[in-house]
Image (spheres, coloured by chain):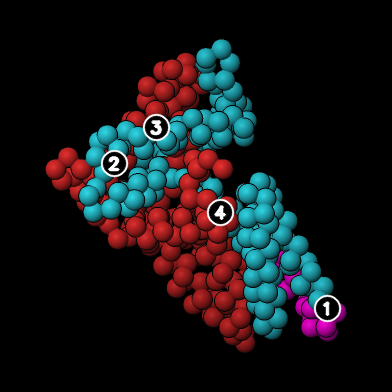
Amino acid sequence: MMTIFTTIVIILVIAAACDVMIARLSGRRLLGYMASFLITLIGLPLALASVISPVDIYAIVVALGIALMWWFIYLNLVQAVESSLRIRMLREIDAEGGSVDIDKLKLIYNDDRLIRIRLKRLEDGGAVRLKDGRHHLNSGKLEKAAHFFTALKRLLLNRRSQFDVQ
Amino acid sequence: MYQNVFFLLLLSIVIGLCLHVFSSRRRHGKGIYKMAILLLNGSLFVVTGLFFLTGIDLTIEQLVIAVVFIESFVAVYCLILIGVVHDSPTLAIVKALMAAGPKGLSDQELDSFIKAHPFVGARLEALQTTGDVVVREGVISLTTRSQWIVRILSVYTRLLRIDRERG
């Protein structure tokens, strides 16, 4: 058991270190995420196969499941730091010395600005096209992601949006 | 050796998830995270009991692995639930564009969409509920806990050389 946990921790430390190194050297976050994921996915089964004797495929599958889940938790934490609206607001308040007038905060963080910034990012990335003054979706990947989360929301909460009136 | 653990986990997760979907729908999402923790751990406990009753061997070592696996799964599932319960602004825009269809979304329709989706208010309310900010006489302040969170996050962003984005 200790062999399994030690191997998982070592592989994940290497994966996270690669992610940080890629971020510092190239600034390309997606590349860092992909590299850390592949190191976990490929590195862990190889490392376990070399230390467990005799090789137990079920032990490797269970260990890989744990490692990938821990990688997913790491990914969520770092993404929250980088893009979560709540974290951004907390950091904004901190930058103002720990307290700020709520109206001043709402000049930066308001729904109109929030949506227009994100729409602009989507347009810059080619996922949304502006044609004849109307915004059109131009991304199959985002459409699939929206379908996935809507399906989960309907399955679990029986609603389509957080702002639906029940 | 770990074959029994594999099937123990598979059964526990399938049963736990089915029970959670059922309970979430019945309770309209009330206590959705607590129920996830309770039902997934509960199903592991019950299935382990059934395994012992039917004479399927499980060592202490295997049980420890199974518990670590289930707790990791609960954490991952709760992280996914956050994305399900709270609409992401970007995905909400995508859904509005999908609903608009081939004719697209005009600026006037975009204004209506913004009015119907008070993201900032919902997030501020959530921060107050979790005790990360306090609002007093029109001033919003960090609490001791959130000050520590921000300090830790700043170390990480400095390590990655990420500039703070606004908005």
Residue labelled with disc 1: B52
How far apart marks 3 and 1 lie (CA) works out to 57 Å
Residue labelled with disc 2: A119
Residue labelled with disc 3: B115
| Residue positioned most to the bottom | A54
The foreground one among A3 and B64 is B64
Residue labelled with disc 4: A158
**Foreground: disc 3 or disc 1:** 3
What color does chain B have in the rendering? cyan
> Magenta segment range?
B51-67
Q: In which quarter of the image is the C terminus of chain A?
A: top right
Asked whether the residues under marks 3 and 2 belong to the same chain, the reply is: no
Asked whether the residues under marks 3 and 1 belong to the same chain, the reply is: yes
Residue at the spot 73% in from the left edge and 56% down from the top edge: B38
- The secondary element bearing badge 1 is classed as helix
How far apart marks 4 and 3 lie (CA) works out to 23 Å
